[in-house]
Amino acid sequence: TKTMLIVLLVTMAAASAMAGSGSVEGWFQAGNDINGYAIGTEETDHGKIAFIKATDPAKDKFGTLMQCYSARDYLGKRIRMSASIKPVGVMNWAGMWMRVDSGRKSTAFDNMQGRPLTGSDDWKTYTIVLDVSKESDSISMGVLLAGEGVVYWDDVRVEVVSRDVPVTDPRTIKSGPTNLDFGD
């Protein structure tokens, strides 16, 4: 609805104004410890990449580099977000995330907490796949860092995929019981 979109835009502008550590055009800084993290971009051999870096994070807090957009073009579809990510010195955990909202209710969500990025690693591509209900208003996505470290990311893509591609939402209810005899 128009009201939801206006509230979303005002929220984005307020979050962007609070983010004093840098900027990434089209993205804003959020989380429950904005002052403990810095965001920005840097030029590399591969072109410009974005980052979120711990500067002085509070214990059990996180920062995120994110954006929100209308779900209008994706209603009733399954979408996949993919990105290349390089964690460096991640002491707690990091991951990319995507959330689909209908009003004030989240209808699909995955933040990779069940498959977290930790330590340091080379560039790898990660994906999140979610269903966008026909009642959805907005989609939010980003990369988050909890604790110390740096997360670099690049080549972010959002695309519609077929229903054959499984969703990654950990809350997805299975169609029936599985592995009842605990076998292989």
Image (cartoon, rainbow, N blue to C red):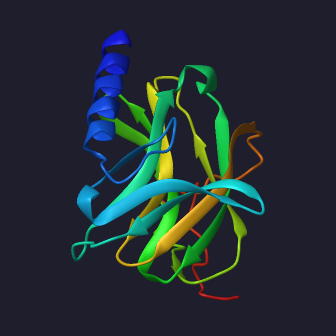
What count of labels does the image hold? 0
Q: Nearer the viewer, residue 29 or 168?
A: 29
In the rendered view of the protein, which quadrant contains the N terminus? top left
> At which x and y percent is residue 157?
69, 44
- In the rendered view, tell whether residue 75 sits above or below residue 49: above
Q: Which of 118 and 176 is in front in this view?
A: 118
Q: Residue at x 67, y 46 (%)?
A: 80
Q: Quadrant of residue 145?
A: bottom left
- In the rendered view, tell whether residue 15 sits above or below residue 22: above
In the rendered view of the protein, which quadrant contains the C terminus? bottom right
Q: Is residue 5 left or right of residue 139?
A: left
Q: Which of 177 and 111 is in front in this view?
A: 111
Q: Quadrant of residue 34?
A: bottom left
Q: Residue at x 62, y 27 (%)?
A: 74
Q: Is residue 104 left or right of residue 116?
A: left
In this rendering, does residue 169 appear at all?
no
> At which x and y percent is residue 25?
52, 37
Residue at the extreme left: 58
